[in-house]
Amino acid sequence: MTDALWHRQTFVEKLHAVGGRAYHDKHPFHLAMNEGLLSPEAVRGWVANRFYYQRNIPLKDAAILSNCPVLDVRRIWIHRILDHDGTGTRRGDLQSAQSTEISAAGKPRLINEGGIEAWMRLGEACGLSRADVIEDRHLVPGVRFAVDAYVNFARAQPWPIAIASSLTELFAPDLMSARLAAFERFYSWIDAPGLDYFRRRVTQARRDSDEALEITLEYCNTPELQREAVRALEFKCDVLWAMLDAIHHAYPGSETAAPR
Amino acid sequence: MTDALWHRQTFVEKLHAVGGRAYHDKHPFHLAMNEGLLSPEAVRGWVANRFYYQRNIPLKDAAILSNCPVLDVRRIWIHRILDHDGTGTRRGDLQSAQSTEISAAGKPRLINEGGIEAWMRLGEACGLSRADVIEDRHLVPGVRFAVDAYVNFARAQPWPIAIASSLTELFAPDLMSARLAAFERFYSWIDAPGLDYFRRRVTQARRDSDEALEITLEYCNTPELQREAVRALEFKCDVLWAMLDAIHHAYPGSETAAPR
């Protein structure tokens, strides 16, 4: 007896169910973070380690581009790299894509600085130097291994499966909103503009996951690919979870100050 | 005795010398093409086969992106993918980057259709159907092998070496200008707008090669990397030459109609 092709709605539900049981919002470290129980040192450690993930995301997305012969999919996917890397100021043809938004501090800011730079500013707002962050001075091995595994997955797997692995974004907007509220409430020692990354990702993650879900539903179109897509999303949840395990071990007891 | 680091000017001269001896503008098929000696069938064969190169260029460039941890380099390099794939019309944030130019036919055209689509229009202007081109119906094995070797090179080599391999663009503007003039003169059965790809590449190739040369000079910064860069450019010349060998064999005698 072979597996049957899932109907679209069933497939979507299977994907959402992965988040329900395995997304890292349920990790003890993440729960502690959103409950305001982290020391400043632990917050800094999380930010510095998570930067390694951020800096590798464009490499992961470029690997997907490089494996994808479908032009229409590439036209959609490339925006992720532009969003993360920013567009810089060197060339004229993309400068018209620049526009301004009002940051939490009320100052207009170019939106094309990119997510990596925004995360860097979060690090600085937490008290990390740019050198601390860029040179991975606080990076723990388990985080490096997990992130590298994710990039290698995107390089080695068929591109629709690699795209399916990105679907943790389905669960990200809620997490980002909760995290933003928690940081504003519990970690007010971090300047508000430092939280711009979280603000922008609420919107971006929703748009990105809509696109990734559509591509997954269209191109993971055999019973085998559907199941592979679910496993890819489980793998990605494992990556995020293992990162928090490693960070948690590096900052033990950071959440014990105020047990419930 | 170990090799010494070349001075910048010497390195540039070594790179240019590769084009002088190995660039495909000197291939018999290319000479015949620019002398107006190709039959319509041979022109179509060249266009259809060369499309396989065009369609793979973004995958090659994405492989370089995926291997490059330097954000500033990625911000430069990603424009190549946008130039080739075009930006489409789906998302709002890049639509402001659209502008119009006047095509040879006097009609305004969105410049963001991308190089692949422009080449497709060349194919149609030559009498190929889109299906002929998209489905690689005229693709000969030697062209496939050469192009695939180029993409694999970009995936496997250190990114500065892969970038150096793209420096055939140093020699492209002259070739594009000569090719454009030859097509307008000898192959006037091809509608002028079909030649837009050549027109745009005169400018793009100059800008692209300026950028690629700067990156090569900066990052191929050891004696070993400098020599490797020269070999990479020789390899790329081999790719282009082998493509023409294969096309020439598929359309034998196409240049014998009017021997000089």
Image: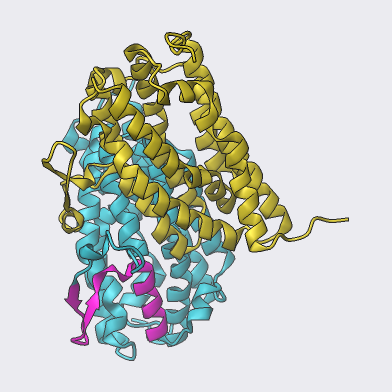
Chain colours: A yellow, B cyan
* Image spot of residue A111 (x, y percent): 21, 47
> Residue most toward the left?
A107
The answer to whether residue B83 is magenta is no
Can residue B216 be spotted in the picture?
A: no
Task: Give the residue drawn at x 44%, y 68%.
Answer: B50
> Of residues B58 and A51, which is closer to you in this image?
A51
The magenta stretch is: B100-125
Task: Give the residue drawn at x 31%, y 34%.
Answer: B70
* Image spot of residue B201 (x, y percent): 26, 65
Left or right: A159 as drawn, with respect to A100 = right
Task: Give the residue drawn at x 42%, y 75%.
Answer: B47
Say if B76 sits above or below A140 in the image. Answer: below
Left or right: A232 as drawn, with respect to A46 = right
Task: Give the residue drawn at x 40%, y 35%.
Answer: A178
Left or right: A22 as drawn, with respect to B67 = right
Can residue A219 be spotted in the picture?
A: yes
